[in-house]
Image (tube, helix red, strand yellow):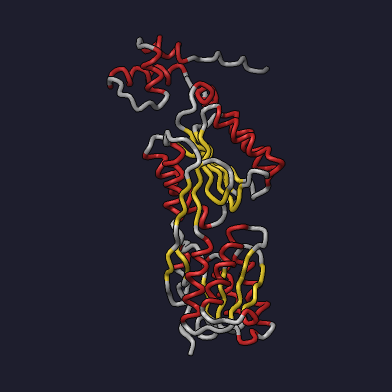
Amino acid sequence: MPHAARPTVTLHDVAAAAGVSISTASRVLGGSTRKVAPENEARVLAAAAALRYTVDASARAMRRASDSIALVADDLTTPSMAVVVAAMEREARTAGAFVTVSSTMGAAERQLETVRVLRSLRPRALVLTSSRFMADALGGRLLKELGSYEREGGRVVIVGETDMAFDAIGFDDFAGGRSVSAFVAETGHRRVAIFGGARELRNMGSRTAGFMDGLRAGGLDERDIRIVYCEVSRQGGFDAARRLAGEGMSGTDAVLAVNDTIAIGAMSGFRAAGLAVPEDVSVTGVDDIPLAGDVTPRLTTVALPLAQAGVEAIRFALANAGGGRRLTLEGRLIVRESTRPRK
């Protein structure tokens, strides 16, 4: 026989059983930062346990959206995103907020649907991270959805390139790419392959453009610069390096990868092909993920302030100022053992 449904226990029931006001019970069970007398707290907790009371999280969200920040990311499996999310979570926790995370794999329709669902749950702020969010995406539907959410009292922060009038935090990818390619040119490399990742990703396109600018300024002829597009993964870098090695390298003495994951894969690919890094070919990356300093040889790269971006995103989300602020973060060249000067 089916069991009878357990009667719903309300906050009012807990307060009555504990002999306190509803506001006191709410502060104890709702995680409020306002202090409650220890004896009252103990009575509320005992009453809640005896009555088997559980907090209705969705009801709380509808009543007040004050402590949740929703992150909408492309791909949560990338090392760089892991650094950003970890920094966001730490900063949110210090402010008494918490972060929820959704992945869209960069699909515009999925981004829109995720924002719609999250908007109905009324988080305090939405933080969207992607290489590019533009106002005309999906015929302006995403912009309209985000605008409606802000008019209802929410905050929108974008980590990445955008022309939308929301707070935004980005990286100077062009300058970062230029700094490492200028170093490669200055150290005597004269035939370079660029592992450019995916053509459609704007941040990687900006890094590639920076690579080209720095190499040209360093005296390389464009005929000696080759761009190889590949999957944005360790396997993508591995496969690109194996293909390049299989074709004979043609004098290529350096590979500039648009991120560290591709660069680390490339180093493995060259080793599998019987080539030594950096003796036969120098390899560089961008991001400075934790693994970049642990691989052998350690990777020369451009350190992007990923953790700072996560912290600033939370600070923007919790601030009272209006939208439209822009913060561009600069990278820093880190020279390690994966490169060496050429004669």
Q: Position of residue 103 (x, y in %)?
A: 60, 46
Q: Position of residue 186 (x, y in %)?
A: 47, 80
In-front residue for pair 124/11: 124
Quadrant in the picture for residue 239: bottom right
At a point 34% along the width and 17% down the height, the residue shown is 43
Residue farthest to the bottom? Answer: 343
Q: Hey, which residue is sitting farthest right in the picture?
A: 139
Q: Please, is residue 200 above or below residue 299 in the view?
A: above
The residue at 37%/13% (across/down) is 18
Q: Is residue 100 left or right of residue 16?
A: right
Locate residue 250 relative to residue 126 in the image: left or right: right
Q: Answer above or below: position of 115 versus 10.
A: below
Of residues 34 and 228, the one nearer the viewer is 228
Q: Position of residue 65 (x, y in %)?
A: 49, 27
- Residue 132, compared with residue 18, is above or below; it is below
196 vs 223, nearest the viewer: 223
User: What is the total number of numbered labels drawn onto the structure image?
Assistant: 0
* Quarter of the image with the N terminus in it: top right
Q: Position of residue 78 (x, y in %)?
A: 56, 56
Q: Which of 288/108 is in front?
A: 108
